[in-house]
Image: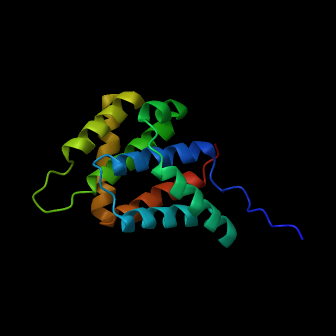
Amino acid sequence: MTMKVPPPPGISPQRMTLLRVVCSMAWSDGELSTQELELMISEFSKLFAQDEAEEHHLRQELREYVTQNIPLEELVPKIKSEDDRKLVLKLSYMVIRASRRHPGEPLINPEEKAAYRRLMELLALPEDTITKVERLADEELEHDHDVIHALMAELGKLRGRSE
């Protein structure tokens, strides 16, 4: 009797790199609740999986990937296209912008701000591009009021793009 081998994940190494950078931003302040993590993993796996078996496999793979602490300096050089660089900036900005835990806290805490600055340096996007991306992310967060929904909308666009 042969064991059924799960299909390869429905997410390419390039897309996985984008998700790893976004997760790195989510962890940059040292806090990411189990509920937030599980929701992100669940939504990401649903977005990229073709069926239930693939979704389960991808969920496991994502859990392993997001717990690895891979430096941005190693991840960002793998992001080649300007569109992907803008997307990872936007998603990262949305994640850290939405992580304010209490009213009156700064929009972005010092740890997140430092990680985000480092990401901007590594992405090497023009300042006006960064400003446009951040403005668009702010508008989408105001419209959706839910970072996971906003992230899924952006990642849904990515799913339809060719590598």
Q: Is residue 64 toward the left or the right of residue 132 in the image?
A: right
Q: Above or below — where is 158 with respect to 56? A: above
Q: Is residue 51 visible?
A: no
Q: Residue at x 26, y 37 (%)?
A: 114
Residue 87 or residue 117, whichever sits in front:
117
Q: Quadrant of the C terminus?
A: top right
Picture quadrant of residue 148:
bottom left
Quarter containing the N terminus: bottom right
Place of residue 27 in the rendered image (x, y in percent of width and height, measured from the top left): 35, 50
Q: Residue visible at 46% across and 51% down?
A: 67
Seen at 66% across and 56% down, the residue is 9
**How many numbered marks does the figure carry?**
0
* Image vertical order of residue 70 relative to residue 40, above or below: above
Residue 142 is situated, as x and y percent measured from the top left of the image, at 27, 61
State whether residue 110 appears in this view.
Answer: yes
Residue drawn at (35%, 43%) of the image: 133
State the residue lying farthest toward the right: 1
The image position of residue 94, as x and y in percent, is 33, 52
Question: What colour scheme was applied to this rendering of the protein?
Answer: rainbow
In the image, residue 46 lies at what x, y percent? Answer: 57, 67
Viewer-side residue, 142 vs 23: 23
Q: Where 4 sits versus 158, above or below?
A: below
Q: Is residue 97 above or below residue 43?
A: above
Q: Residue furthest front?
A: 1
